[in-house]
Image (cartoon, rainbow, N blue to C red):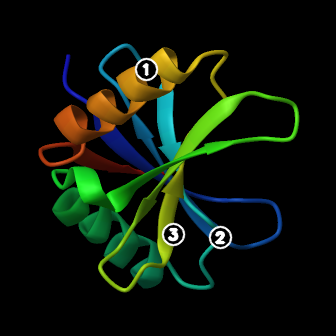
Amino acid sequence: MAGKFELFTAKNGKTHFHLKAGNGEVILASQGYAARSGARNGIESVRKNAGDAKRFEKKTAKNGKHYFVLKARNSQVIGTSEMYESERACDNGIASVAKNAPGAKLAEG
Protein backbone atom coordinates (compact mmCIF):
# COMPACT_ATOMS: atom_id res chain seq x y z
CA MET A 1 0.00 0.00 0.00
CA ALA A 2 1.32 3.43 -0.94
CA GLY A 3 1.74 6.38 1.38
CA LYS A 4 -0.82 9.17 1.55
CA PHE A 5 -1.26 12.69 2.80
CA GLU A 6 -4.20 13.40 5.05
CA LEU A 7 -5.42 16.99 5.25
CA PHE A 8 -7.60 17.93 8.24
CA THR A 9 -8.78 20.82 10.37
CA ALA A 10 -7.88 20.75 14.07
CA LYS A 11 -10.15 21.93 16.89
CA ASN A 12 -8.34 25.30 16.88
CA GLY A 13 -9.43 25.87 13.27
CA LYS A 14 -5.95 25.44 11.79
CA THR A 15 -5.42 23.09 8.85
CA HIS A 16 -2.74 20.40 9.20
CA PHE A 17 -1.49 17.48 7.18
CA HIS A 18 0.07 14.15 8.01
CA LEU A 19 2.08 11.95 5.69
CA LYS A 20 1.28 8.32 6.42
CA ALA A 21 3.31 5.33 5.29
CA GLY A 22 1.63 2.41 3.57
CA ASN A 23 1.08 0.75 6.97
CA GLY A 24 -0.94 3.77 8.16
CA GLU A 25 1.73 5.11 10.53
CA VAL A 26 2.22 8.89 10.60
CA ILE A 27 5.77 9.58 9.41
CA LEU A 28 5.61 13.36 9.04
CA ALA A 29 3.35 16.04 10.56
CA SER A 30 2.90 19.66 9.54
CA GLN A 31 2.49 22.87 11.44
CA GLY A 32 -0.96 24.47 11.54
CA TYR A 33 -1.94 26.60 8.56
CA ALA A 34 -4.52 29.38 8.61
CA ALA A 35 -5.93 28.28 5.23
CA ARG A 36 -6.32 24.93 3.47
CA SER A 37 -4.51 26.35 0.48
CA GLY A 38 -1.44 26.91 2.65
CA ALA A 39 -1.53 23.30 3.81
CA ARG A 40 -1.86 22.10 0.20
CA ASN A 41 1.19 24.21 -0.71
CA GLY A 42 3.00 22.58 2.22
CA ILE A 43 2.17 19.14 0.85
CA GLU A 44 3.56 20.10 -2.55
CA SER A 45 6.71 21.35 -0.85
CA VAL A 46 7.10 18.02 0.97
CA ARG A 47 6.69 16.16 -2.33
CA LYS A 48 9.38 18.32 -3.96
CA ASN A 49 11.88 18.32 -1.09
CA ALA A 50 11.61 14.77 0.27
CA GLY A 51 13.89 13.41 -2.45
CA ASP A 52 16.80 15.64 -1.39
CA ALA A 53 18.73 14.20 1.58
CA LYS A 54 20.13 17.70 2.34
CA ARG A 55 16.60 18.89 3.23
CA PHE A 56 16.39 16.55 6.24
CA GLU A 57 17.86 17.65 9.55
CA LYS A 58 18.23 15.11 12.36
CA LYS A 59 17.77 16.35 15.91
CA THR A 60 17.83 15.02 19.45
CA ALA A 61 15.15 16.04 21.94
CA LYS A 62 15.88 16.89 25.58
CA ASN A 63 14.66 13.43 26.57
CA GLY A 64 17.32 11.83 24.34
CA LYS A 65 14.92 10.66 21.63
CA HIS A 66 15.69 11.28 17.98
CA TYR A 67 13.56 13.02 15.38
CA PHE A 68 13.97 14.90 12.12
CA VAL A 69 12.56 17.89 10.33
CA LEU A 70 12.13 18.38 6.60
CA LYS A 71 12.99 21.85 5.37
CA ALA A 72 12.08 23.70 2.19
CA ARG A 73 14.66 25.49 0.05
CA ASN A 74 14.14 28.64 2.12
CA SER A 75 15.12 26.64 5.25
CA GLN A 76 11.60 26.76 6.72
CA VAL A 77 10.44 23.58 8.41
CA ILE A 78 7.61 21.95 6.44
CA GLY A 79 7.27 18.77 8.50
CA THR A 80 8.38 17.11 11.72
CA SER A 81 8.70 13.41 12.44
CA GLU A 82 7.64 11.39 15.43
CA MET A 83 10.14 10.64 18.20
CA TYR A 84 12.40 7.62 17.73
CA GLU A 85 14.29 5.59 20.31
CA SER A 86 17.43 5.31 18.16
CA GLU A 87 19.22 7.23 15.45
CA ARG A 88 18.91 4.20 13.19
CA ALA A 89 15.11 4.23 13.57
CA CYS A 90 15.20 7.97 12.77
CA ASP A 91 17.20 7.22 9.61
CA ASN A 92 14.56 4.65 8.64
CA GLY A 93 11.89 7.33 9.13
CA ILE A 94 13.75 9.67 6.78
CA ALA A 95 13.99 6.90 4.19
CA SER A 96 10.26 6.25 4.52
CA VAL A 97 9.40 9.92 3.93
CA ALA A 98 11.75 10.07 0.93
CA LYS A 99 10.11 6.94 -0.50
CA ASN A 100 6.46 7.75 0.25
CA ALA A 101 6.11 11.51 -0.19
CA PRO A 102 6.71 12.05 -3.93
CA GLY A 103 3.83 9.88 -5.10
CA ALA A 104 1.54 10.04 -2.08
CA LYS A 105 -2.11 10.77 -2.82
CA LEU A 106 -4.07 13.41 -0.90
CA ALA A 107 -7.04 12.48 1.27
CA GLU A 108 -9.01 15.49 2.54
CA GLY A 109 -10.91 15.22 5.78
Circle 3 sits on which residue? 77
> What residue type is disc 1 on?
Gly
Choose the circle earlier in sequence order: 3 or 1: 1
Does the rendering let one see residue 9? yes
Q: Secondary structure at mark 1?
A: loop
Identify which residue is drawn at 36% across, 46% down.
5
Q: Amino acid at mark 3?
A: Val
Indicate the amino acid at tag 2.
Gly
Residue 21 x/y as whole percent: 35, 26
**Disc 1 or 2, which lies upstream in sequence?**
1
How far apart marks 3 and 2 lie (CA) works out to 12 Å
Q: Quadrant of the N terminus?
A: top left
Q: How busy is the neighbourhood of tag 2: few (under 14 within 10 Å), some, or many (20 plus)?
A: some
Q: Residues within 10 Å of mark 1 (few under 14, many from 20)?
A: few
- Measuring from the top left, give residue 53's x and y in whole percent: 24, 50
Q: Is residue 97 above or below residue 30?
A: above
Left or right of 9 in this view: 24: left
Which residue matches tag 1? 24
Q: Marks 3 and 2: CB-CB under 8 Å?
A: no
**Which element type, helix, strand or loop, lies under badge 3?**
strand
Q: Earlier in the sequence, mark 3 or mark 2?
A: 2
Asked if disc 3 and disc 1 are in contact, CB closer than 8 Å, the reply is no
SS category of the residue bearing label 2: loop
Mark 3 Cα within 10 Å, few/some/many (few <14, many 20+)?
some
Q: Which of the two marks, 3 or 1, is nearer to us in this view?
A: 3
Q: Quadrant of residue 40?
A: bottom left
**Residue at 36% in and 35% down:** 94
